[in-house]
Amino acid sequence: MKSILVIEYNRCQRNQLHHILSKANYDVVLAESVNMGIELLKTVSPNMVLCSNAKAEVDGIEIYQHFVREGLGADCSFILLSDNVDFEFVEKTLEAGIDDIIPTPFSTSQLLSVVGNKLKNDTHQHITQKKEVQISEAEKEFCNFQSFVDNYKSVYYSSKQVVFREGCSQSYVYVLKHGLVKEYAVNEDGKEFIYSLYGDGDLFGHYTLFEPDRYFCSVATVKECEIVLLPIQDVQDFVLSNPLATKNLFRLMSKNIIQKKKRLLEVAYNSLSQKVAESLVYLEDKMQKDTDFKNFGIQISRDDLAALSGVATESLIRTLKDFKDQNLIDLTRYSIKILDQPRLKKLQAV
């Protein structure tokens, strides 16, 4: 009989899990806290740990990492029960080594399906061995992709130069080695809206990779850039011959789409100051690897920043002046330096 250690802080939820799993012929051991779970793992060897992420002393990732450090539960699967299933949290959780997430509230069939499949196909090895395999595979894939990109020459673009236009036939996928580019669209009135920015090391122009047609948006440089152009057929061949590359590409595309959706909602419903604060935080994150950013701050035209924020240029200029008066940023003619990121993030979230 397979055994499952359940770490759940809510008594009703704990009893519900015990009832469902016991009825499905699992040997269930209950713990009402992390400390109790740690003590139990020293004496029992379950096939799976089912841990709640709600109202915990520490979050599920920290619990898992503590188990790893202590050498506990090395031969069992670790599944997290969580009401937080947004993309960034799920990605962070799975990258930490946790086997799966069950969103709460869950149905009986959903719980038993995930638990059953994990235990049935459990080829779980020692955690340290698993980590070594994951790291070596990731490093191998990164080296493979770098070697692939290195086969192609870089093209240098001047500031404000168009890389490709909306509606043009797709011929390449692009890797930005250095610089900053904007992905944008222009409406019938000639107003520009920037969907995304790409910085050093980013991949772009990849959305229709498996069904090449026409670019759905335009891309232009914000500053001088060095870009590698990868012929689309070559990229298809590389991705299809490297399973991990395929997985990573789909994860990247999913993340990009979710970020775009989030930004569009913010542009639609946030206040003027929230929109500008969000854009400044977003820009700072995108430009972290840029040496010019470290020396001079954010270098972007007021028109581009307005298009990124979804506001009129005049409104943007007034808001930037307000931010300067509050000592949130420092302004020069050509750059913006963030002086108080925590306050800016707090303003963004208000």
Image (spheres, rainbow, N blue to C red):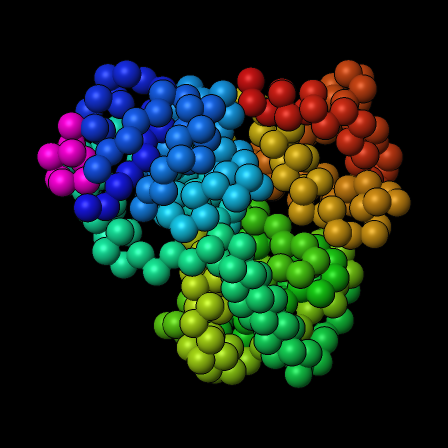
Left or right: where does residue 45 sit relative to residue 257? left
- What range of the chain is rendered magenta? 19-26
Q: Evaluate whether residue 97 shows in this view.
A: yes
Left or right: where does residue 240 sit relative to residue 144? left
User: x, y (%) of residue 332?
Assistant: 86, 35
Q: Nearer the viewer, residue 114 or 69?
A: 69
> Which residue occupies 47% across, 24% down?
35
Number of numbered discs visible in the structure rendering: 0
Quarter of the picture containing the C terminus is: top right
Taking the view exactly as shown, the residue that stands out farthest to the left is: 23
Q: Quarter of the image holding residue 79?
A: top left
Task: Kindly report the secondary structure that dominates the magenta region of the rendered protein.
Answer: helix
User: x, y (%) of residue 281?
Assistant: 66, 35
Q: Nearer the viewer, residue 109 or 231?
A: 109
> Which residue occupies 51% across, 59% down?
129
Asked if residue 283 is among those painted magenta in the image, a careful observer would answer no
Q: Evaluate whether residue 315 shows in this view.
A: no
Asked if residue 23 is among those painted magenta in the image, a careful observer would answer yes
> Which residue occupies 63% across, 39% down?
282
User: x, y (%) of residue 276?
Assistant: 63, 30
> Which residue occupies 75% across, 71% down?
156
Left or right: where does residue 57 sit relative to residue 139? left
Note whether 133 is above or below 350 in the view shown: below
Note whether 119 is above or below 84 in the view shown: below
Left or right: where does residue 310 sit relative to residue 47? right
Note whether 213 is above or below 183 in the view shown: below
